[in-house]
Image (spheres, grey):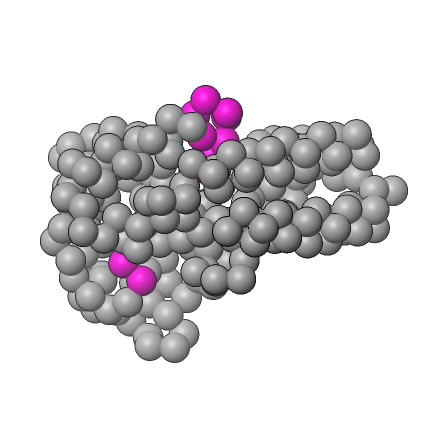
Amino acid sequence: MKNRIRICFLIISVSFLLMISTFAQDAFNLRSVTAGINITQENFRLVLKKTKTFLDKGRDILERRGFTLEGVRLATNPFYLYTKGLSVKETLDFIKKINDFTQQHRIALSIGAGIIDDSYDQEIIEKICAVLTDTSANTSIVIASKEHGIHYDAVRASAETIKRLSELKTMANFSFAATANVPSEIPLLCSYNCPTIKSSLAYLKLRTKSPL
């Protein structure tokens, strides 16, 4: 596992350096650097530590090359994958550990989607509400895809989530997104779902922002 992480970050680092070398002469403002990671209950501490080191290096390289970077972000694989079998309270306690780490290091956090197919899951709704009212994390529910069209049950789950969040903590709705036909890898934090790929634990996406 450690060797796999090293190889992954080495590949990312080389690609990253090549990319910024291309654009360095016309440096522009960047909204963020987003790292997509795959975590489990067993490896999350190690992966978070490696990702933080990588984001720090990325920020340093960009700023030394003249870019202005507003912030860094981290998005995980869909959270239902790594909280399967956990109760609502256990899920909240686990995600709080991730959130505490990202808050400490000033990294914006998305925990991936709660529902990605056409399904309604009451427990997932409860988990989303618990997490969004007690952490700074972002999450989403996929309500439509190009492959399967409208996810009607997921639409119902999203509507219920939004209503419950409005009753519990209105502002928490700004950390939730019901997404339609959004590719999983785009760096829009609420809807970013790092694909679960065994051969890769993280990769970067850059999103530009107009000059301040």
Quarter assignment of residue 168: top left
Image x and y of residue 109, in percent:
43, 37
Q: Is residue 15 visible?
A: yes
In the image, which residues are magenta? 102-116
Q: How many marks?
A: 0
Quarter assignment of residue 152: bottom left
Question: Looking at the image, which residue is at 31% across and 62% down?
Answer: 116
Image x and y of residue 76, in percent:
42, 48
Residue 75 vs residue 181, the one in the foreground: 75
Image x and y of residue 133, in percent:
23, 32
212 drawn magenta: no
Q: Is residue 114 visible?
A: no
Q: Is residue 98 positioned above or below 39 on the image? A: above
Image x and y of residue 79, in percent:
32, 50
108 drawn magenta: yes
Question: Looking at the image, which residue is at 50% across and 51% down?
Answer: 1
Residue 91 vs residue 70, the one in the foreground: 91
